[in-house]
Amino acid sequence: MQLDYASPPRGQKLERIRAFLAKLSLDWDHTIEHTVCLLEDDHIVATGSLRQNVLLCIGVDPSLQGEGLTATIVTELVKLAVQSGKTHLFLFTKPENEKIFTSLGFYPVAGTSDVLLLENKKDGIRQFVQSLRQPRVDGVIASAVVNCNPFTNGHLYLLEKAASECALLHVFVLSEDRSAFPASVRLQLVKENTAHIPNIIVHPTADYLISSATFPDYFHKEKGLSSEINCKLDLTIFATHFARPMGITRRYVGTEPNCAVTAAYNRQMKSFLPTMGIEVVEIPRYELGGQPVSASKVRALLKEGRLDEIKPLVPPATFAYLERMTPID
């Protein structure tokens, strides 16, 4: 047997991999960046892929299962991840394959009826959540999960409104670094722009909320996937690993008139989270001149260098940052 690599596979090679996975009732993932195949007489007998720090689409020919081929594929994928600087790894599989991957050093994070997510750090998510500041308060503890790419007056309106309706508001800022503004900048701007709100605590999300591991379609909004997105895993992680131990019983979101993917996510959130004991409150989008204020509008204006038109759309801390930075691509 020999190993074959592609970053990512295309053409006939991709079609062969798709066909192999289909026989195993596995779907190809359009976000894959690297793939490893194990070949015997030029036939695929095992394969696996990598997206960011997530191992997925791992399958072995049924006639060869139990011969260590899964371990071979996983070992190669881990090597590729580590070579690119990624050491905290996640793995997608079917729930019935849990024992196979726990024997290879992965630990369950959360699952649905269709998929199980594991990580290579024992109790990683529990330790992360425990590290977050969680003061005890009387009254409703609520949350908001935001990207803020960048932070606008729309975000400020949402968070001020949410904070006014609860005793404590945990604001989780996506740590995934796949937005126009770096995660560190987005986190800092949220902290600076909400510093005047005493009952807000701002947290990063690490890889655990709306990330390549939990909800990759969020970062591919341009592909028109709104009817296909499945964010139940992400919502399950939020409900079981964040909301439950942190005492969160309410989640705030803004209405989404422009982005079909985010609107679909909001609909699924409103359907699923109440079954987990979490109220979902949707706040109408903040408007200026009859138009919703959005981060995408700010980015478009910034690209054109139209800072004067941006100023009414963002708080002072955001505007000061935008004045200092070079135009985004």
Image (cartoon, grey):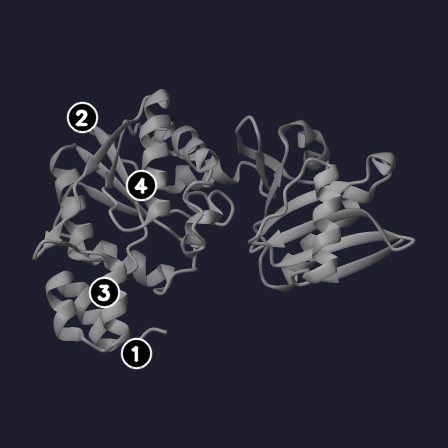
The amino acid on which the numbered mark 3 sits, given as a three-letter code, is Val
Spatial distance from mark 4 to mark 3, Cα to Cα? 31 Å
The residue at which mark 2 appears reads as 138
Give the number of the disc on residue 326.
Answer: 1
Pointer 4 or 3: first along the chain = 4
Give the number of the disc on residue 133.
Answer: 4
Pointer 4 or 1: first along the chain = 4
Pointer 2 or 3: first along the chain = 2
The residue at which mark 3 appears reads as 298
Q: Is residue 316 above or below residue 236?
A: below
Pointer 4 or 2: first along the chain = 4
Q: Closer to the camera: disc 4 or disc 3?
A: 3
Q: Residues within 10 Å of mark 3 (few under 14, many from 20)?
A: many
Q: Closer to the camera: disc 2 or disc 1?
A: 1
Spatial distance from mark 1 to mark 3, Cα to Cα? 14 Å
Residue 291 lies in quadrant: bottom left
The amino acid on which the numbered mark 4 sits, given as a three-letter code, is Arg
